[in-house]
Amino acid sequence: MITLTHAKYDTPTEIDCNTVACRNCGICRLGTPLTATHADPRLLERIAKNRRQIKRGELLYGMGEPLKALYAIRSGSIKTYLSTMDGRSQITGFHIAGDPIGLADLTTGTYSTEARALENTHLCEIPVDHLQQLAEELPDLRSQLTHLLCNEILRLQKLTLLLGKKTAEERLASFLLGIAQRYHQRGFSSHEFNLSMSRNDIGTYLGIAEETVCRTLTRFQDEGLIDNQRRLIRILNAERLHTLTQS
Amino acid sequence: MITLTHAKYDTPTEIDCNTVACRNCGICRLGTPLTATHADPRLLERIAKNRRQIKRGELLYGMGEPLKALYAIRSGSIKTYLSTMDGRSQITGFHIAGDPIGLADLTTGTYSTEARALENTHLCEIPVDHLQQLAEELPDLRSQLTHLLCNEILRLQKLTLLLGKKTAEERLASFLLGIAQRYHQRGFSSHEFNLSMSRNDIGTYLGIAEETVCRTLTRFQDEGLIDNQRRLIRILNAERLHTLTQS
DNA sequence: TATAAACACTGATCTGGGTCAATTTAGTCG
DNA sequence: CGACTAAATTGACCCAGATCAGTGTTTATA
């Protein structure tokens, strides 16, 4: 079984096992399905110009800043969030290796969220003018970008159902299975994983208090649904968790 | 002052004042800004094949159905919503004249929400294969579609902030000003409008109970912020409402 | 290996808004 | 018009989860 074994609160190292090869990256996949006769490497190099790395807690970009580049995560993870005037914030997404960030801001030219690293993170920087020019040339890239935008809408629609109508228990169950599924899609274990975000972050994403996150995880553990070792989570009964999600 | 004067619970009539000309429609605008040297009419006809009209309460499409067409609203309004397994639902959007519906489902080929008419509604039906073929030919149409997708993401991000972190009062204030702004963009009054949705629908959109919607609107009226005549709303103090939105 | 600083967890109490139960007000239709 | 029906409103009560106030536990740092 492959598990994510990166150190907790990891230190700045070389790209570790939780890295996604360019041909598996969401942007670079160029519309070819998972069974890709892998994309032209020169093409991939043309899309992502620079590499960049940021440390845990660092800001990648702030809301309102002019959009200089999009990013694709090579390793690590990023949270994006919005805030009210008086400082309450709502995390709109956790982004892991292979995910693009900032796509939705392409047409307005301004970042609509804050983006902050949850751990030390390696990124590909994709200049926007460059991407748009390439997209004009490459129909496959265009359809991949459209696909990513559509998926983001579907994800946010499901998030509104969660935030508007689900109980704390349903939210946590949905969250855990969602994380498991995403890791699984990237070839990692869907039963055991290290969360890169704090309990506070989870609450800020699910629209509940940190304490409610803790209490609910503890209850799931007591009921034998998960093994809760702080950030290391083992899913013990995915079946029953799924019935708890109410979706 | 132009106000929306269609009859309450309106009856099936010819297209009324709350109609958007094709050249102002979200999809047909073809990337040209508001100051458009208006688009080629033959082009517009090529995009929207059939007209369709549905009555208040009728289903336009159901979740999970194969995507046959996208729709653009000519007049009237539509709600789209998701539901939990046990029947709680979350409205993900209210759509009015000029809005496209179903765009986000283009790449999956299946409707991801239910869509139901809030009043008698006239639509343009846009076959998907046809749209995609046209988009290949027309760069302006492509960029308009991308723009619409991006805007939908930004809208849903703001909705998650509302659902995850705002109080009932903040939700209602945001909602009223949001409606006002959208009507304003379409050339109607931003101070007086008829809501096409029930109090129950508003609650189902804002993640609060119908009763809380009523109580909060009543309070806004008592405080002189709005004039609340059932579905006819007059904004009396937009300034102060805005400070209540916390965004 | 101390010490500090996050982070995770737990218990006690409180409250915004949900739920339940009427009542009032329009809109519809014979 | 008057009866019927759906929607809107109001009041009383209740509870899921927030908030407050700690106590453990792990990581970071000296």
Image (tube, coloured by chain):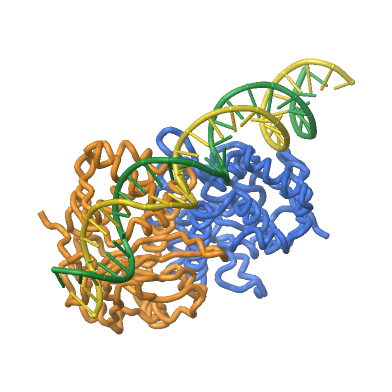
Chain colours: A orange, B blue, C green, D yellow
Q: Position of residue B182 (x, y in %)?
A: 65, 59
User: In the rendered image, is residue A246 in sight?
Assistant: yes
Quadrant in which residue B242 is drawn: bottom right
Residue A115 sits in quarter: bottom left
Residue B238, relative to residue A132: is it above or below?
A: above
Q: Nearer the viewer, residue A84 or A94?
A: A84
Quarter placement of the C terminus of chain A: top left
Q: Position of residue B181 (x, y in %)?
A: 67, 61
Q: How many marks?
A: 0
Q: Residue at x 25, y 36 (%)?
A: A223
Vertical side of A213 occupied by D16: above or below:
above
Residue pictured at 61% horizontal, 54% vertical: B170
Horizontal side of B97 relative to A103 (left or right) equals right
Residue B189 in sight here = no
**Quadrant in the picture for the N terminus of chain A:** bottom left
Question: Could you say where residue A109 lies in the image, as x and y percent from the top left?
Answer: 50, 77
Q: Residue at x 36, y 49 (%)?
A: A213
- Seen as rendered, the residue at the extreme left is A1
In-front residue for pair C1/A104: C1
Against D28, is B215 above or below? above
